[in-house]
Image (cartoon, grey):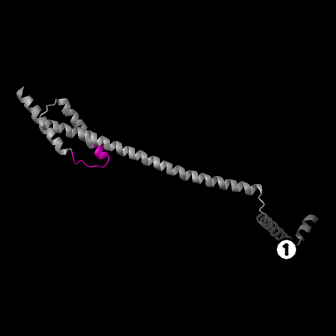
Amino acid sequence: MEAITELFGLNYQTILLGFFAILVAVKEFFEIRDWYKHKFGIKTAADEAKESIEGRIAMLEKHDKWQYEEITKIAQGVEDIRRSQLDSTIDQQRWEILDFSSALMGGRKYNRESFDHVYRIYEKYENVLRENHMTNGFVDDSMKIVAEYYKAQFTENLKEN
């Protein structure tokens, strides 16, 4: 019981003041230590580890930027190749239709499978244009000519039989 009585008899103001004095002393100790480290260029293992980590982070950020730029270049290259392939496909299909139409107007005769082939090419051509939000300005007239020749050639054959 005496211990409890002595505990209540302590001067708490002095204890609290002593505690804060110790905290201030510890804070000052660290500030003086940091001042000496800075003044004399002293590096601790923690400082070196921190610098090493910061250096690695800077290097990784630089590498990430480089990677992003390279990926962007590759993506642009792929897009250029895709666009070139698309243009080539459209040109080939367009040329096949135009050439077929010109040959018909020149008097050349084709069988039904050739006409079917041109109609399939035309359908693919229209699908490619639609999927890529492009418009057709070249083969519509040629397809009208193909349709007229198809109708004339195969209607005449039906009438003759």
Does dot 1 land on a helix, a strand or a loop? helix
Report which quarter residue 119 is drawn in.
Answer: top left
* Front in this rendered view, residue 24 or 74: 74
Camera-side residue: 66 or 121?
66
Picture residue at 16% right of the left edge, 39% below the top: 102
The residue identified by callout 1 is: 13
Q: Residue at x 20, y 38 (%)?
A: 99
Residue at image point 15% right, 42% down: 144
Say left or right for 6 vs 76: right
Of residues 121 and 71, which is closer to you in this image?
71
Q: Is residue 129 magenta?
A: yes
- The location of residue 124, given as percent across then percent down, is 27, 39
**Residue 91 relative to residue 103: left or right:** right
Which residue extends farthest left? 160
The x, y position of residue 21, in whole percent, is 83, 71
Q: Is residue 41 above or below residue 75?
A: below
21 up-or-down from 138: above or below? below
Residue 106 seen in the current view: yes
Q: Where are the magenta residues, as a range?
A: 127-138
Q: Residue furthest front?
A: 106
Q: Position of residue 7 (x, y in %)?
A: 89, 67
Q: Amino acid at mark 1?
A: Gln
Residue 45 in which image quadrant: bottom right
